[in-house]
Image (cartoon, rainbow, N blue to C red):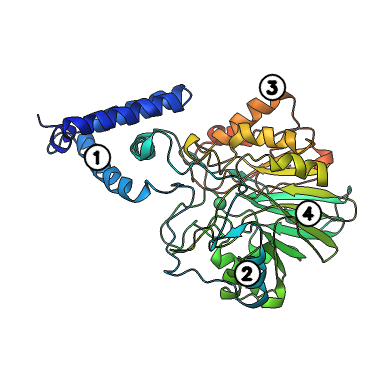
C-alpha cells in the first residue's frame, strides 16, 4: 500500500516532519487533549493516497486541506475563532479627526495597532496537528439538545432592587442596568457568526429577547471589530434607533458604513474615557487583534472596558489573552461590582489572545476579584473544545480556589448581590433531552 508520506516526502522532509511532532510534544502539556492531538496527527500521516475505507478517504481529504492551509498560515497567528474575513477586499478606514486620533495613538505604528508585548506568531504543534484536531478531535462542539433559556422581559419592566442588574443574552452580549442606565455590550443577535450570513458558525440557541423587545438602551459598548462581536445585521438595526456607540479607535468606520451617524460614534484609545448618558466608559488595554476584511488586520484597536455609573463599576474584558496590564487596571479602576471575562474559544495555540477558564481566573485575581460573570461562550462553536467545557472547567477551578462566580442561565436577568452562586445550567441540557427548542425555564 502506498502512503502519502512515502510519496510526498524525501527522507530529509521526514526528518523535518518528525521534528515538528517532537517540538509539539515538548510545547504541549501532556494530557488527554494532547494525546488525542498526537493520535490524530499520526493517523493522518498514515492516510493512503488512494482507495481505502470512507474513513481513510476522509483523512486523505483532510490531509490535502491541511497541506494547502499550511502554505497560507505559517506566517501569522491562525485563529479559527475568527471566521474568514470576506466582508470586503479593502479595509474601510476612519477619516478626519478620528483618523488623526488613530495616527496619534501610541499603540499605532507602521499602519497597524500593536499589543504592548509582541506575540508569538506561529502555531504550537504545527498547523497540521491543529486542523487534524479540528476535523477529528471528537469533542461535542454543539449541544445535544436545546439550551434552557429564561425570558427577562418581566424583570426588565421593573427596576432592580439593588440598582444593579445584568442579563447575559449569549456570547459576549450582556445588558447591564446600573443606577437606571442601560448598556448593551457587543450585541450579536444574528443567526450566524459570518460575513455573508449563510455560512459560518450557527448559534446554539435563539436569542432570549429580540432586539425590538429590549428596553431603551443608553449606549452600546463595542469591544472590537471581530465578527462575533460586531454583528453587521444587529448594528444596522441598532443604527436606526439612534443609540450612541462607544468603541475603540478605528472601529467607527465600520459603524458609519452600517448606518450610524458620525455624531453617535465615540472612539477611544486605551486609557481614555468618555461620559455619556450618565455613564463613564473607559477603554483599558487588552491583548488581542482585530480585522474583518482582507487587509484589515489590526487596522482598528481592541480594548477592555470599565463601565461606571454613579454607584457601580463593571469591568468587561472584550477578547483578550492574559496580560500584566490587568494588575494596573485593577489598582487604577477597581474594585468592581462585576467582572465580565471571556472564557470560551480557548486553545494552547491561541492562548496569548484568548483567556480560557484558567487564565480568566488569574485575570480575575489580578483585577482584584469580586464577582465573576463568564462570557464569550455557550452560543457559538468557535474553538475545538466541547460546547460546555468552558463552563464546566471554570466551575471546577473556581470552586477549588474559592472564587465567587455566577453562571446564570441565558436570558436570566439577575442582580449579582441576590445570587448565592453559580448555576450549572449546561448540565440540564442532557437531562432535558430532545425537547422542541427553545426550552423556557421559569423561576
Ligand atoms: Fe476577537
> Of circles 2 and 4, which is in front?
2
Q: Relative to 169, does residue 24 appear above or below in the rendering?
A: above
Residue 52 visible in the displayed image = yes
> Does mark 1's beta carbon lie closer than 8 Å to ligand 1?
no
Please tell me which of labels 2 and 4 falls first in the chain. Answer: 2
The crowding category of the residue bearing disc 2, from other C-alpha atoms within 10 Å (few below 14, some 14 to 19, many at least 20), is many
* Residue drawn where x is 32% and y is 28% of the image: 19
Q: Which mark is residue 58?
A: 1
Find disc 4 in the rendering and name its residue: 307
> Of circles 4 and 3, which is in front?
4
Describe the element under mark 3 as helix, strand or loop. Answer: helix
Tell me where residue 231 sits by quadrant: bottom right
Q: What is the CA distance from the residue labelled 1 to the residue labelled 3?
A: 42 Å
253 displayed left or right of 127: right
Describe the element under mark 4 as helix, strand or loop. Answer: strand
Find disc 3 in the rendering and name its residue: 400
Please tell me which of labels 2 and 1 falls first in the chain. Answer: 1
Q: Relative to 388, does residue 68 appear above or below in the rendering?
A: below
Describe the element under mark 1 as helix, strand or loop. Answer: helix
Describe the element under mark 2 as helix, strand or loop. Answer: helix
> Does mark 2's beta carbon lie closer than 8 Å to ligand 1?
no
The crowding category of the residue bearing disc 4, from other C-alpha atoms within 10 Å (few below 14, some 14 to 19, many at least 20), is many
Please tell me which of labels 2 and 3 falls first in the chain. Answer: 2
Q: Do labels 2 and 3 touch, CB within 8 Å?
A: no
Residue 119 x %, y %: 53, 43
* Residue drawn where x is 39% and y is 38% of the image: 130
Q: What is the CA distance from the residue labelled 2 to the residue labelled 1?
A: 43 Å
Amino acid at each position: 500500500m502506498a502512503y502519502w508520506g512515502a510519496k510526498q516526502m524525501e527522507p530529509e522532509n521526514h526528518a523535518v516532519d518528525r521534528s515538528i511532532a517532537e517540538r509539539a510534544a515538548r510545547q504541549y502539556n501532556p494530557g488527554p487533549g494532547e494525546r488525542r492531538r498526537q493520535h490524530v496527527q499520526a493517523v493522518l500521516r498514515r492516510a493512503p493516497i488512494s482507495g481505502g475505507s470512507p474513513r481513510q478517504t476522509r483523512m486523505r481529504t483532510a490531509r490535502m486541506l491541511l497541506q494547502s492551509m499550511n502554505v497560507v498560515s505559517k506566517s501569522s497567528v491562525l485563529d479559527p475563532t475568527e471566521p474568514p474575513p470576506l466582508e470586503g477586499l479593502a479595509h474601510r478606514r476612519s477619516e478626519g479627526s478620528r483618523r488623526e486620533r488613530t495616527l496619534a495613538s501610541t499603540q499605532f505604528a507602521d499602519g497597524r495597532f500593536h499589543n504592548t508585548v509582541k506575540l508569538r506568531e506561529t502555531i504550537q504543534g504545527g498547523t497540521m496537528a491543529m486542523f487534524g484536531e479540528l476535523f477529528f478531535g471528537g469533542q461535542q462542539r454543539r449541544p445535544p439538545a436545546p439550551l434552557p433559556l429564561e425570558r427577562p422581559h418581566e424583570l426588565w419592566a421593573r427596576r432592580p432592587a439593588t440598582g444593579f442588574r445584568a442579563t447575559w443574552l449569549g456570547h459576549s452580549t450582556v445588558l447591564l442596568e446600573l443606577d437606571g442606565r442601560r448598556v448593551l455590550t457587543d450585541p450579536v443577535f444574528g443567526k450566524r457568526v459570518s460575513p455573508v450570513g449563510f455560512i459560518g458558525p450557527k448559534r446554539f440557541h435563539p436569542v432570549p429577547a429580540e432586539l425590538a423587545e429590549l428596553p431603551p438602551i443608553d449606549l452600546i459598548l463595542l469591544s472590537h471589530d471581530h465578527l462575533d462581536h460586531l454583528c453587521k445585521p444587529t448594528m444596522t438595526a441598532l443604527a436606526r434607533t439612534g443609540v450612541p456607540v462607544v468603541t475603540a479607535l478605528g472601529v467607527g468606520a465600520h459603524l458609519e458604513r452600517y448606518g450610524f451617524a458620525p455624531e453617535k460614534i465615540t472612539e477611544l484609545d486605551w486609557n481614555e474615557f468618555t461620559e455619556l448618558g450618565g455613564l463613564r466608559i473607559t477603554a483599558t488595554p487588552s491583548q488581542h487583534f482585530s480585522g474583518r476584511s482582507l487587509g484589515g488586520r489590526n487596522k482598528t484597536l481592541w480594548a477592555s472596558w470599565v463601565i461606571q455609573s454613579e454607584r457601580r463599576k463593571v469591568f468587561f474584558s472584550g477578547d483578550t489573552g492574559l496580560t500584566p496590564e490587568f494588575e494596573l487596571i485593577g489598582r487604577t479602576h477597581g474594585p468592581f461590582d462585576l467582572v465580565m471575562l471571556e472564557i470560551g474559544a480557548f486553545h494552547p495555540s491561541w492562548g496569548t489572545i484568548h483567556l480560557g477558564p484558567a487564565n480568566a481566573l488569574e485575570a480575575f485575581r489580578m483585577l482584584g476579584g469580586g464577582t465573576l460573570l463568564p462570557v464569550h461562550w455557550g452560543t457559538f462553536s468557535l474553538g475545538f473544545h466541547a460546547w460546555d467545557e468552558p463552563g464546566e472547567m471554570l466551575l471546577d477551578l473556581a470552586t477549588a480556589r474559592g472564587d465567587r462566580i455566577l453562571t446564570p442561565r441565558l436570558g436570566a436577568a439577575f442582580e449579582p448581590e441576590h445570587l448565592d452562586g453559580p448555576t450549572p445550567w449546561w448540565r440540564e441540557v442532557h437531562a432535558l433531552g430532545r425537547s422542541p427548542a427553545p426550552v423556557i425555564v421559569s423561576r
